[in-house]
Every structure is written in C-alpha cells, then in structure tokens.
Amino acid sequence: MTKNQRLLLIIGGGVAVLLVAALVAVYLLGGRGKGPDSGVLARLQSGLSAVTGGLTAPPAEEAKTFAFRRLEIDVSKPEAEACLVFTRALDASGKTHYEDYLSVDPVIRIAARVVDTRLCLAGMAFDKTYNVTLKVGLPSAGGDKLTEEETVPVEGQHGGRQCEE
C-alpha cells in the first residue's frame, strides 16, 4: 500500500466517523417516543426537524394580516386572465361575490373565480391596461377583511405567468 492510498484511507475513515457521529446526534435529538411512530427513521426525522426547524419559512397561511400580495397574468387563453394573489385563502364556495369588492377602470364586464389564494379575473383584452381597485372589506375564507383600498394596474400582455388550479 502506498503513502497516498494510506492517506486516502485515513481521510475516508475520518469522514465516515464524522457522518456516523452526526447521525447518532440527530437520532438522539429525535427523543425517546413510544408507540408505532418511534422507530429509527421517525427519530431521525424528528431530530432533523429539531435541527432545521428554525430555518424554514412560515407557510403563507400564517401571514400576520390579510392583504394583496402580487399579480399573475395568464395569456394562454383567448382573453387575458389576471390572478390577484392574496396572503390567505379566499372563499371558493361561491357565497362571496368578489365582484362586489372590485372596480375596474375602464369599466368592463369581468368573470371572477377563486383558486386557493388567487382571485382570477377573466374578460380583459390583450395589450390594454386596466386599473383594478380592491375595495376595503374584501374577505378571506376565514373572515379576515382588507383594511385598505388598493389599486392594481393590470396589463394583458404576452409572457405572463399562468394561474394554476
């Protein structure tokens, strides 16, 4: 065995020892739960969650206030569709008439549909700019309401992002 081979063997062994030590530490952080979900993999998962728990972003549903977040345009249809994305889910039951909480300038007839946190508006022409005003009181599915009026410029141009169902 040459010197280089021995050196590689020593380095490889050191890396293996470090990996085993890390796995043991994560396993021990996983706790000593009892029951069907207390196996080795469950403990490793729990330990990893304990180590990385502070690194994940909170879900959108945990936003402090209900508000408009961004605009997405879908130009894959004959008429452009603007999706107004909010910080919380909207009422998809059909009981809330979101058209009552919007005004569009210039005035056009629009069709609104809810997809999770999106309020998608159809009926806008390509290459035309509309100002969509979100009125105070627009509700989320949980009953939270917009506290401030906001006007969003919507331009139906090619190259937009598609609304997802």
Image (cartoon, rainbow, N blue to C red):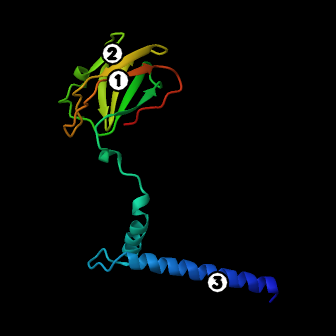
> Where's residue 55, x and y in %?
44, 58
Q: CA distance from mark 3 to mark 2?
A: 68 Å
Of the image marks 3 and 1, the number of the one nearer the N terminus: 3
Residue 160 as seen in the image, left or right of residue 87: right
Which comes before the other along the chain, label 1 or label 2?
2
Q: Are marks 1 and 2 in contact (CB under 8 Å)?
A: yes
Q: Amino acid at mark 3?
A: Gly
Identify the residue at horizontal 51%, vertical 81% (top origin): 21
Give the quarter of the image for residue 41: bottom left
Question: In the image as oriented, which residue stretches furthest toward the bottom?
Answer: 1
Q: Position of residue 116 (x, y in %)?
A: 31, 38
C-alpha distance separating marks 3 and 1: 61 Å
The local secondary structure at tag 2 comes to: strand
Q: Residue at x 53, y 81 (%)?
A: 20
User: Which residue was labeled with disc 2?
Assistant: 104
Kind of residue at disc 1? Leu
Question: N-terminal of the two: label 3 or label 2?
Answer: 3
Q: Which residue is mark 3?
A: 13
Q: Secondary structure at mark 1?
A: strand
Q: Answer whether labels 3 and 1 touch (C-beta < 8 Å).
A: no
The three-letter code of the residue at mark 2 reads: Val
> Does residue 156 appear to the left or right of 69 in the view shown?
right
Quarter occupied by residue 79: top left
Q: Residue shown at 29%/78% (left/top)?
A: 33
Q: Is residue 22 above or below residue 155?
A: below
Depicted 134 relative to depicted 91: above or below: above
Instruction: Classify 10 Å Cα crowding around label 2: few (below 14), some (14-19), many (20 and above).
Output: some
Which residue is tagged 1?
A: 121
Q: Position of residue 133 (x, y in %)?
A: 32, 20
